[in-house]
Amino acid sequence: MPDVAIAAPNEAAADAGEQVARAGGNAIDAALAAALVTMVNEVGLVSLSSGGFVTVQPPDGSPPQTVDGWMDMPGRGRPLGGGTWDIDTEYGGGVTVTIGPGSVATHGSVAAFEEAHRRWGSIPWREVVTPAIAVARGGFRLSSASRYYLGYVHDSIFGWDDQSHAAVHDADGEIETGLIMLPDLAVSLELIAADGAAALHTGELARLISDDVLRRGGILGAADLAAYRPVVRPSLLSTVGDWTFGTNPPPSVGGVCVAAMLRLLDGRPGGAWDADDIEHLVRVQRAVLGHRLDVLDGTDDLARDAGAFLTLVDRDHLAVLESGSTAHVSATDSDGGACSVTVSSGYSSGMIAQGTGIWLNNCLGEQELNARGLHGLAPGTRLLSNMAPTVGHHVDGSALAIGSPGADRITTAIVQAVAGFVNGGLGLQQAVDHPRVHVHRAGRADEVVKTETELSMYYGGVAATLRRPGQHMVAAADPRRDGAVRLVHGPTQGPAGEV
């Protein structure tokens, strides 16, 4: 039984990671168990109808791998279009979101979890799912992150579907402050524990979800769910000092942005962040996020154009700098393994699939990620993603797992925490806590440089864990959310680490 450090979005998720670690699980088992709990209790941010990525540093020191469980475009064998409407919300600085049954994409996160567990897990799959079943069966209260998000959209997104409205509202139509009870969700998780991801792709849950979506005018059919496959790829690597970081490769755009920003920071900050460092950070964000808006979001070959951009970054930093709703869990263990998991259901379609207790995603309706339009991709095509779960390996054998939720703030949150820790000499928790900067709508006429003056979940929710030489374990969770950490020590291991 290894020592395991876990950083999760809430106490129940951290408890799940601890429970699995005490049962003999490693970092991969613990991270997956915690992430499954977030799919129950981080309402509005993530659900079982989600996509995600799992980046793993294997304990043998081999190169990191990323399991792509992100969303596919549905619609095989049927006309596309319909079943959606737009809503405007001030959440996240102001966005227009497309919701409704036609916004539901083909989920894949549980399939990715199952694949990661098959390759690197150490305890039975059922034990990984069991804590999530218990949370769903016992009921749960909304997290602060959920309450914050629902404060903007509890009527516009979560009010049009009867089941959804009843679940998150009290008798007076206010956001529920008591226990959320979804008996069907516990039953759904029991099916996933017994049958694995097949329950969501070819089994009873797949049938219930696709039947309900199609009945209400959406395009997600049984053939879309049955055809889905997670994809395992070598992680995208970047070297920062004595660290080698592996993050999410294309077709996700988030990892490309993290890699480019880390390279362009050129070792900054050299100590505490100063005014010159912040100015340089803003230039880096403007260059990378601007290039993303101009090129990467609309490309027909992300791997090609991302490779060309990173080559330019490596060849001529100056030329680049002078040019124009989510949950995360991290875990590391004393065997040297690290696991970084980020999952998302978009802003939510607003509907619970009949008979499942599962809020369905609206990832076709995230307009900032769908440059080609609502139904503009061929069925079976992976959608674009901001997510960038990242692991690091140091020459001394240290292992780091880090990531964040936060839409387009994911990459900037991760980079600032990594830079403060690796370059600036901050402790891991200090680096996570440090105020952040984000360039919103980079390079556009309405660009805004947002500087954090008080802690806000707008700037992400970084979760990070670290194994130092000598099996010293560290975990850091973001105070911007209800972050929670756990350090679990095996019976024969040395002294406790630090939180």
Image (cartoon, rainbow, N blue to C red):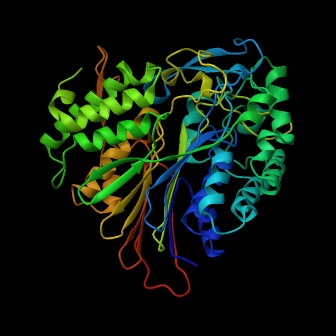
Does residue 2 appear to the left or right of 61 in the view shown?
A: right
Above or below: residue 116 compared with residue 168 = below
Residue 475 quadrant: bottom left
Residue 498 quadrant: bottom left
Of residues 282 and 262, the one drawn nearer to the viewer in this rendering:
262
Does residue 210 appear to the left or right of 102 in the view shown?
A: right
Does residue 450 appear to the left or right of 32 in the view shown?
A: left
Q: Position of residue 28 (x, y in %)?
A: 57, 61
Residue 470 quadrant: bottom left
Who's the residue at 66% across and 27% down the image? Answer: 380
Above or below: residue 238 compared with residue 300 = below
Of residues 431 and 435, the one drawn nearer to the viewer in this rendering:
431
Above or below: residue 476 compared with residue 71 = below
**View extreme (left): residue:** 276
Please give the count of numbered marks on the rendered protein.
0
Q: Is residue 478 visible?
A: no
Q: Position of residue 80 (x, y in %)?
A: 70, 13
Above or below: residue 110 compared with residue 467 = above
Q: Is residue 489 visible?
A: yes
Does residue 80 appear to the left or right of 190 in the view shown?
A: left
Quadrant for the C terminus, please.
bottom left
Q: Position of residue 256 (x, y in %)?
A: 38, 37
Q: Position of residue 280 (x, y in %)?
A: 18, 37
Quadrant for the N terminus, please.
bottom right
Who's the residue at 73% across and 15% down the image? Answer: 83
**View extreme (bottom): residue:** 492
Who's the residue at 44% across and 27% down the image? Answer: 302
